[in-house]
Amino acid sequence: MPAEFFSEISDAATIPNYYYFDGSTWKASGSGKSVPVVSPIDNAVVGTLPIVTHEEIDTVLQVAGDAQAAWEATPLFKRVGIIHLAADWIRHFQEYMGNLLIREIGKSSDEAKGEIVRTADLIDYFADEAQSIQGTTLDSDNFPGFEKGRIAMIERVAHGTVLAIAPFNYPVNLTASKIAPALLMGNSVVVKPPTQGGISATHLVRIFQKAGVPPGVITTLTGTGEVIGDYLVSHPKVSMVAFTGNSDTGLAIAGKAAMKPLLFECGGNNPVVVMPDADLAATAREIIKGAFAYSGQRCTGIKYVLTTPAIRDQLVAIVMKTLPEMVKAGDPRSPDTKLVGPVISEEAAKRIEEAIAVSVKNGATLVTGGKRDHAMIEPTVLTGVIPSMPVIAKETFGPVVSFVDVASFDEMASIINRSSYGLQASIFTKDEGTGLVFAKKLHVGTVQINGSPQRGPDHFPFLGVKNSGVGVQGVRYSLEAMSRIRPIVLNKPQ
């Protein structure tokens, strides 16, 4: 593949002219409207994305539906080969893609490179695992009252056209985590990328197209959620919606998607429980990493810590001592910056600043941080926080960690279980048995013992309960979610 691989879209000036690539030609959007992609680093415009019209959405979804049957009929080994080739090309362009992520969403060099490498590995794993998805048969006489003579042949088939909606914080990885399983199971895919991260996601789709996915089977539709989101998720030609984003948006989509299958990962607001016997030095490092990596803009980020006042005093002291070693806020392009750069926009930073200020006004103690400079929020530690304060009542998508004093384990469980969020929780203790017993009391998707919340390894099940998600992700689980079973029953003459 020539070096001009991205020539159609790598120049930011060309991006607003196109909304759909059919495998041979870019189609121009006639809306005349676009949205700028502004770097959180310096407010420079990285590029612009078109806001497509509803008529253009109709066209793309018609083409996607028309192309899907032939793609599903393509032998699996051929689909697997195309997906593996896409992973290879992502690795080939990892420096290009990583640098684009830095500019577009403000990731550090290490975080951006990590996202690209992890994406390629994930795609390969999907392709390998898809070959083990098999149908099965059932005999009628297994169930009481039925004789032999009926055989159910149960196969997995595609839903049809999958709408993939990804967030700004992992626009490559979390787009690929939807595209790869959907394509492997025979679906066509329409990607609605975020605005911030939309250029990176468009490049990713281009890689799949260049790797050999047929015209119309994978396409991109760009525009703001306010303008095209409702129309897309409720469209009759969309067969399934796969979404990652905040809980409020997830709830709104679920209400408009009617009877479509959903695969959602929404807000986290993840708590940490620190038991009296925990290794406080190790716990402090996990809290810092979990709270401040990518400036706290992760659904699996640590948001608040539950412990007794006596443990809290010791733990906060260790956190404050360790913080300068692990965190240095600054320009993500600088090799000196550690974990914390700007949040995604100045508007987002203002919301975080306000949540901190209101919480402090209502009685929280600001231990460190709290100040804003454009899109930069200082790494912030708060104590004396109660669950009704805004820093933990709603997910704060920024570099803020709050300490909540509790009197008992029952109170810890009650605070976690009352929350409308339920992605993950962490328990720190030297007694793994105690940790396992307490973990079973928590109404969350996953409980981590002696580790911070995380999505991976990617073949582990990943899910949220309550307002944190619908369905189960993880390599095999995502492949199964991107398909449905189709039983065909043979009735043999008696």
Image (cartoon, rainbow, N blue to C red):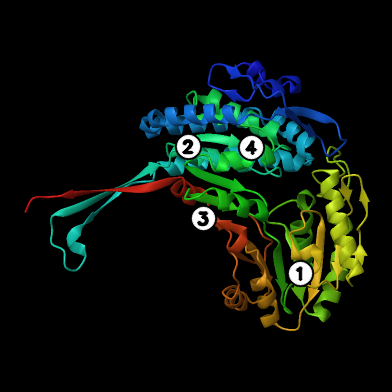
Q: Which residue is mark 4?
A: 228
Answer left or right for 341 relative to 266. Answer: right
Q: Position of residue 433 (x, y in %)?
A: 59, 77
Label 4: how many residues lie within 10 Å, few (<14), some (14-19) or many (20+)?
some
Identify the amino acid type marked 4.
Answer: Ile
Badge 2 marks a residue whose secondary structure is loop
Identify the amino acid type marked 2.
Answer: Lys
Which mark lies nearer to you, 4 or 3? Answer: 4
**Does residue 342 appear in this view?**
no
Identify the amino acid type marked 1.
Answer: Val
Q: Which residue is mark 3?
A: 471
Q: Marks 1 and 4, Cα distance to the nearest angstrom?
A: 38 Å
Q: Which residue is mark 2?
A: 237
Are circles 1 and 4 on residues that touch, CB within 8 Å?
no
Of residue 171 and residue 390, the one placed in the foreground of this image is: 390
Q: Which residue is mark 1?
A: 305
Identify the amino acid type marked 3.
Answer: Gly
Decide: is 361 above or below 441.
Answer: above
Which mark lies nearer to you, 1 or 2? Answer: 2
